[in-house]
Each structure stands twice: as structure tokens, then as C-alpha cells.
Amino acid sequence: MARAAATQRSTRIQREKIELVAEAALEVFSTYGFRGSTIDQIADKAGMSKPNLLYYFDSKEAMHVFLLQRLMAMWIAPLREIDDAGEPLEEIRRYIGRKLEMAREHPRESRLFANEILQGAPHIQALLTGELTQLVDDKVTVLKRWIDAGELVACDPHHLIFSIWATTQHYADFDSQVRAVLGSDDEKRFEDARLFLETLFLRGLRP
């Protein structure tokens, strides 16, 4: 964790410095990956000396773990918001929308997460097998109940969730490819993607 944040007595200036370092680390890690990044690069991006940076985080790994832990809390929030008392197709539509919005608003965070997973998730394995797995299991139970009630077609709920992750996060992790193929930087690509994915999933899930 952030060294200067380890105590509740951290000052406003310390918290601001931690955010400055975190922002610089996010930019560097999402561009070069964990292995390809250096503390010197992060210090340069933050406009700080290396010794000053190391006052706030004692290692490159500490910065990486700090970012990933914060990212995980944000990343699973849309899944947590699926309401088991809601109308099934509407809840799935909203989930797709939230995930695409995150892809649009937080592409660097998505690439940071993707790079970590591609390396075997060495820094967040406990989060994946713990909190995330428990939350997915809870939502799978909800999806199974909707399927059993005839409100969704029969399908494997785990793979439904995986498919939504894959299709929505594509627009963050492979955005340069999407823009190149479309020949445009128009933000309308996210709205077009939302409409297509809603049609793809909701038509396929409607009984």
C-alpha cells in the first residue's frame, strides 16, 4: 500500500502526492506493462525525484498493487449493482451499458488489469479467487433463478458474464484497433457498440 497512507494521520498534501504518483504510475503501467515500467519513468512522469517518490511508495510493486486494488473495487461495482429484484433483461442491458461506459471512461485502468491477467495475475490472485469469485457466484445464483423462472433462455450464467466482460472491455483494451478499422475517433463508436451488444445479448436471452 502507499507508505504515507499507512497511518490515519496522513496530511492533505501527502494524500495529494499519493494521487499524483498513482496517476503517473497508471499512465506508465498501462503503456509499458509492469515488467516494462521503471520507477525512474514514474518519477519523471510525476515530476518528482526518485527519493521523493519512494517516500510515498517503497517499490514499483507497491504502486502496482495499490492501483490494482483500487481498480478492482471500481471494476466489480457494475456487477454488484445487478438487482436480483429487477427485470432480468433490463438489468443485463444496464450492466452492458455500465461496462461500456467504464471502457470509454477508464481505458488505462482496463489495460492495466488486462496486462496483470496476461501475466498470470501475480498481484491480485487473492482478489480474483476471493471477492470477485464470491460476487460472480452470487450473481450466477440470481441468473439461474431467472432462467428457472423462464425469464431468460437456458444458458451457462458464468459464460454469459464472461462474454459481457470480453465484448465490452474490447473497446478499451483494443481501442486503437477499433479506431483504425473504423477509420474514426468519433466517440459515437461506444454508442454504436452499446446498441449492437444490447441487441446481440437481449435477443439471445429473451425467452
Image (spheres, rainbow, N blue to C red):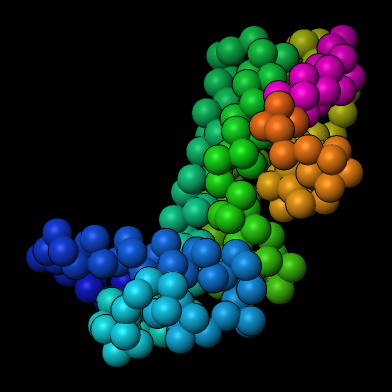
Say which of 152 and 22 sits in front: 22
Note whether 20 is above or below 135 in the view shown.
Answer: below
Residue at x 58% of width, y 26% of height: 82
Residue 182: image location, x then y, percent: 85, 38
Residue at x 35% of width, y 75% of height: 47
**Would you say residue 36 is visible in this rendering?**
yes
Magenta-span inclusion, residue 100? no
Residue 87: image location, x then y, percent: 64, 10
Note whether 33 is above or below 79 in the view shown.
Answer: below
Q: Residue 44: which quarter of the image? A: bottom left
* The C terminus, quarter of image: top right
Note whether 56 is above or below 184 in the view shown.
Answer: below
Say which of 179 and 77 sits in front: 179
Q: Which residue is farthest bottom?
A: 51
Note whether 59 is above or below 128 in the view shown.
Answer: below
Residue 128: image location, x then y, percent: 61, 58
First to last magenta residue range: 190-207
Relative to residue 193, is residue 137 drawn left or right?
Answer: left
* The N terminus, quarter of image: bottom left
Residue at x 54% of width, y 60% of height: 127
Q: Which secondary structure type mostly characterizes the magenta part of the structure?
A: helix
How many numbered circles are shown? 0
Residue at x 58% of width, y 20% of height: 84
**Would you say residue 96 is visible in this rendering?**
no
